[in-house]
Amino acid sequence: MGLKVQAPDVNVSQSEFTVTEDGIMVGLTLLRDVGRDLADRIVSEAPYTGLRDFCARIMPTTTVMKSLAAGGALDAFGARLGIATVSDNILTSIRKQRKKVS
């Protein structure tokens, strides 16, 4: 009997490890730079329709975005390297948009 370990996913993971029908899902707090408060906020805001929606609602740092991408938690939104590469641009764009509105 082998257990399948599933990568974290911002749309379905919890803060800590969880048991699923398919095995065990890694919790978001296990990723570098993702603390309990941030993981709990990500879980409570889920689901996300895309990367921009996630960024606009959570406003993580670029460091956190790169950690989530590297850990597989953003795989539903694209390739890990691509997400890590564009995350700073997306966050900057959202900040500028918010600044114009306020």
Image: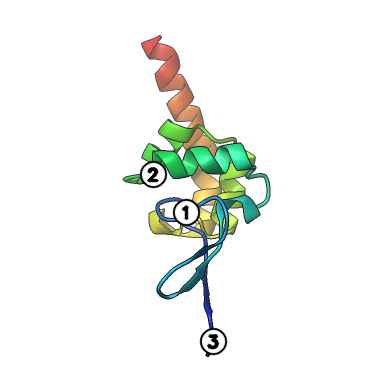
Q: Is residue 87 above or below residue 59?
A: below
Report helix, strand or loop for mark 2. loop
**Which-is-in-front pick, marks 2 and 3?**
3
The quarter of the displayed image where residue 76 is located: bottom left
Who comes first in sequence, dot 2 or dot 1?
2
Q: Are marks 3 and 1 in contact (CB under 8 Å)?
A: no
Indicate the position of residue 59 as horizontal and vertical percent values: 50, 32
Of labels 3 and 1, the one closer to you? 3
User: Could you classify mark 1 by the number of other residues whose Cα lies within 10 Å: few (under 14), some (14-19), or many (20 or more)?
Assistant: many
Q: CA distance from mark 3 to mark 1?
A: 25 Å
93 left or right of 33 in image:
left
Mark seen at residue 42: none
Foreground residue, 15 or 83? 15
Marks 2,3: beta carbons within 8 A: no
Question: Residue drawn 52% across and 60% down?
Answer: 72
- C-alpha distance separating marks 2 and 1: 12 Å
**Which residue is rendered at x = 42% and y = 18% of the image?**
98
- Secondary structure type for disc 3: loop
Residue 81 against residue 47 in the figure, above or below: below
Q: Amino acid at mark 3?
A: Gly
x and y, in percent, of residue 20 in the image? 44, 69
What's the residue at 48%, 23% (across, down)? 95
Look at mark 1 in the image and give the residue it sits on: 74
**Mark identifier at residue 2:** 3
Determine which residue is flagged by label 2.
Answer: 46
Say which amino acid is labelled 1.
Answer: Leu
Query: Where is residue 69 shown, x and y percent of the image?
Result: 54, 53
Query: Could you say whether the residue bearing mark 1 is in a helix, strand or loop?
Result: loop
- Viewer-proximal residue, 13 or 92? 13
